[in-house]
Image: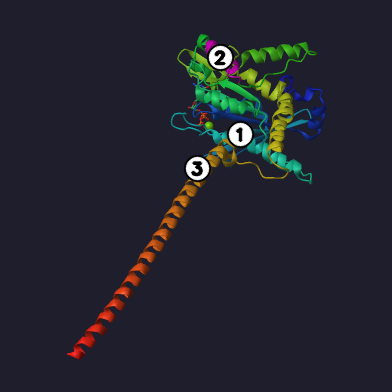
């Protein structure tokens, strides 16, 4: 990292910056997207370029997303002047195609919510130890470079992510599209994002800083950032050694602004907008989560789990109602049948009684006849 292109966050005057400057910033980036779009490669590219000087660099598999997959958490410490950033990058396993794998991405949404939840719980604790904090400050969403437009799957996930985190869409593997197709693709994506009301992170345009405002405008215009990822050193036709991907026609260069927006993205993340990403996460996304949770549950109550979500609850309620109705109908039917049986028993008993008295009557008549017959035979 050269001193002229340092983290830059150290130069920002801001209240939170002062706090952050004393304690060091915690900054968490997460990559999300379908399988094989180059998420892991992009992280490695970041670490092999700008972040190559990172101290205390660790990778580990930690948090389980579901039974089959887990996220990889990469931690690194960056330092500029005396300014420290504890960087965490969360690499998620790619989800499959929507058709075969409906909702396979749901654990990712849950993961984001869970980090807000964990932080909120810690805030509610009286003791003030250092909080563990994996709230996501920037979520890179990888879009497959089809050249067409966003898929329904993308729209669905991006909508959900956009209301929870600073969502930064990126076009994966930009080297597989021509410059014209890429420009058209990016425009179509912007149109769909607007039409669908997907919330994406937009660098704020500060009015009191003309240079910064211009930079923010350039960044906003470049969204969604096109990405080329590679950790390979290759030699260009004009003899430069760069990170890139080699083709017969030449080299697709990671850090060439005519080839892709990797530099813009990197600059936004770890130089110019890190603090804004932290601020908006705290003030907007975390605050939203906290508010929502406060409204839907009492203080200290555990989190409403997925099975308790309103949609599921509605269905469960309807099912329970239907079941209760069925049981009631069965009970009524049984009671009717029981009454019918009792009536039948009474009727039979009465029949039995009258049969009995008829028998008794006949027996008495028989006795009387026998008595008469005996007398007669005695006479004989
Ligand atoms: N053409 C091209 N290929 C790339 C690029 N980035 C990564 N790849 C290749 O794409 C393949 C998948 O890359 P990964 O980084 O493993 O993809 P991933 O998104 O992490 O995949 P999952 O972990 O399965 O979700 C590898 O063969 C990479 O070399 C790129 O910018 N351009
Ligand atoms: Mg990967």
Label 3 sits on residue: 322
| Crowding near the residue tagged with mark 2, few <14, some 14–19, many ≥20 C-alpha atoms within 10 Å | many
Front-lying residue, 166 or 219: 166
What residue lies at 21% left-to-right and 86% top-to-bottom? 376
Q: Earlier in the sequence, mark 2 or mark 3?
A: 2
360 up-or-down from 328: above or below: below
Q: Quadrant of residue 171?
A: top right
Callout in the foreground (2, 3)? 3
On whether residue 98 falls in the magenta region, the answer is no
Label 2 sits on residue: 186
Q: Which residues are magenta?
A: 182-197
Q: Main secondary structure of the magenta part?
A: helix
Disc sitting over residue 41 in the figure = none
Residue at disc 3, secondary structure: helix
* In the image: residue 93, left or right of residue 248: right
Q: Earlier in the sequence, mark 2 or mark 1?
A: 1
Q: Which residue occupies the extreme top position in the image? A: 180
Front-lying residue, 270 or 335: 335
> Residue 125: x and y, percent?
76, 45
Question: How far separated are the C-alphas under marks 3 and 1?
Answer: 45 Å
Q: Quadrant of residue 24?
A: top right
> Residue 254: x and y, percent?
57, 19
Q: Earlier in the sequence, mark 3 or mark 1?
A: 1
Label 1 sits on residue: 90
């Amino acid at each position: 990292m050269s001193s002229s292109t340092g983290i830059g966050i150290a130069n920002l005057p801001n209240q939170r910056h002062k706090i952050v400057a004393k304690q060091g910033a915690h900054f968490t980036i997460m990559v999300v997207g379908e399988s094989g779009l180059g998420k892991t490669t992009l992280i490695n590219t970041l670490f092999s370029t700008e972040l190559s000087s990172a101290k205390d660099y660790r990778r580990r598999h930690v948090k389980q997303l579901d039974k089959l997959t887990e996220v990889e958490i990469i931690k690194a410490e960056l330092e500029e002047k005396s300014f420290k950033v504890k960087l965490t990058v969360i690499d998620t396993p790619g989800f499959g195609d929507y058709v075969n794998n409906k909702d396979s991405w749901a654990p990712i949404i849950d993961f984001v919510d869970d980090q807000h939840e964990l932080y909120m719980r810690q805030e509610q604790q009286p003791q003030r130890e250092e909080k563990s904090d994996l709230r996501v400050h920037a979520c890179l969403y990888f879009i497959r470079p089809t050249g067409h437009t966003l898929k329904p799957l993308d729209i669905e996930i991006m909508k959900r992510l956009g209301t929870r985190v600073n969502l930064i869409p990126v076009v994966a593997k930009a080297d597989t599209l021509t410059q014209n197709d890429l420009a058209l693709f990016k425009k179509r994506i912007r149109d769909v994002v607007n039409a669908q009301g997907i919330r994406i992170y937009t660098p704020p345009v500060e009015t009191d800083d003309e240079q910064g405002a211009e930079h923010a405008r350039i960044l906003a215009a470049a969204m969604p950032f096109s990405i080329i990822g590679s950790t390979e050193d290759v030699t260009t036709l004009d003899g430069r050694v760069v990170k890139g991907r080699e083709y017969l026609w030449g080299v697709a260069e990671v850090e060439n602004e005519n080839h892709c927006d990797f530099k813009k993205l990197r600059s936004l993340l770890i130089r110019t907008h890190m603090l804004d990403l932290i601020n908006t996460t705290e003030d907007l996304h975390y605050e939203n989560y906290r508010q929502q949770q406060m409204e839907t549950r009492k203080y200290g109550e555990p989190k409403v789990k997925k099975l308790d979500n309103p949609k599921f609850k509605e269905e469960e309620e309807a099912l329970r109602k239907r079941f209760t109705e069925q049981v009631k109908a069965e009970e009524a039917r049984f009671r009717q049948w029981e009454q019918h049986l009792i009536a039948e028993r009474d009727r039979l008993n009465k029949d039995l009684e009258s049969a009995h008295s008829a028998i008794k009557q006949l027996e008495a008549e028989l006795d009387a006849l026998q008595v008469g017959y005996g007398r007669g035979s005695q006479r004989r």
